[in-house]
Amino acid sequence: MRVGVAGLGKMGAAIAARLMECGHEVSVWNRSADKVKPLADAGATVAATPAGLAAQADAILTILTDAAAIDTVYHGPSGLLSGNVSGKLFVEMSTVRPDTEIALAEKVRAKGAAFVECPVGGTTGPARQGKLFGFAGGSEADVTRARPLLDQLCRRLEHVGEVGAGSGMKLAINLPLMIYWQALGEALAISRHLKIEPARLMDIIADTSGASTAVKNRGPNIAAWLGGGDFGTVTFNLDDARKDIRTMIAEGKARGVELPLIEKTLACFDEASAAGFGQKDGSGVAVYWAGRGKS
């Protein structure tokens, strides 16, 4: 299949590379050219504009920063919808509020194209291995059309409802993880007087009900960081996590739902970012809090 990918951040680049390995003819576009080069060197076709990307592909996947980026990439003068896209399939994978996806779906369908939202759970490692968890929103017919492509990216794909449901589910599954990173930092803070070596401490936590799946996967990296070393490859930074938390809070307010824990968590993430952790791994709020106030 001819597939276009717009938005080559860490996840977008990993998804594009995975699709190339699956044998698709992949075209890519990104606002900054430096993120295009590695995929171009691997054989991807580079589009000069989003409109050019849409013209080259039968299915277009987008994974963008926020609602403003979606608006620019889809509706700009050389945007994805600026040309004839009738009959094409759009799969929107960004983490944004449901209202953003619902409004976009209407505009895509008005151009005669199909639309599915599919934000995913997982980071770049699972993306490269085709082991993401996809939350698809759309009509039964459109999701069925997109499924063969999404099955190559996801170990599990759940059709959770119409457009908007996927975004709502993604925000819901990310919310407790964000709170968990702060909770882990507080747990580390109250146990630091025990003087347990970081690798052993994280191994103990990971083997208990006090650990999330994310800790079981990232424990060694966090332990190295706690010990004064480097975390390793950053797959999702703290400032991106802050953006997602703000999106969760906005969604809660729009639905009249109080979210006191995640609101307090945002303040903790903001403090960690101001202390220089913004471009470090999202789990860095735990590392920051573990050492906060330490003399």
Image (spheres, grey):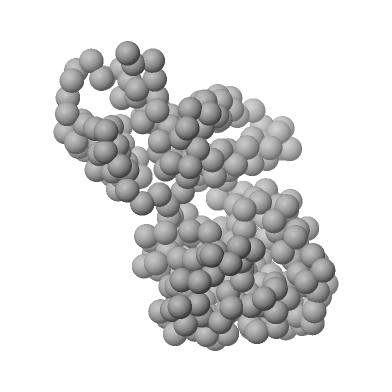
Q: Nearer the viewer, residue 101 or 60?
A: 60
Give the position of the N terminus as an image quadrant.
bottom right
Q: In this view, does 83 lie to the left or right of 220?
A: right
- Percent coordinates x, y for residue 253 in the rendering: 71, 33
Work out whether residue 227 or residue 196 is closer to the camera in this orientation and state it: 227
Residue visible at 47% across and 32% down in the picture = 276
Left or right: where does residue 14 sit relative to residue 94?
A: left
Q: How many numbered circles does the render carry?
A: 0
Q: Is residue 160 visible?
A: no
Residue 61 x, y percent position in the rendering: 60, 70
Residue 294 position by quadrant: top left
Q: Where is residue 134 in the image (x, y as percent from the top left)?
A: 50, 61
Left or right placement of residue 230 versus residue 8 in this view: left
Quadrant in which the C terminus appears: top left
Using the image, determine if residue 25 lies above or below residue 152: below
List x then y, in percent, for residue 193. Answer: 23, 15
Q: Nearer the viewer, residue 166 or 286?
A: 286
Image height of 25 relative to 239, above or below: below
Residue at 39% from the left image edge and 67% from the top image edge: 128
**Residue at image coords 43%, 73%:** 18
Which picture quadrant has residue 55? bottom right
Is residue 201 in sight in this rendering?
A: yes
Q: Which residue is drawn at 35% across and 45% down?
A: 214
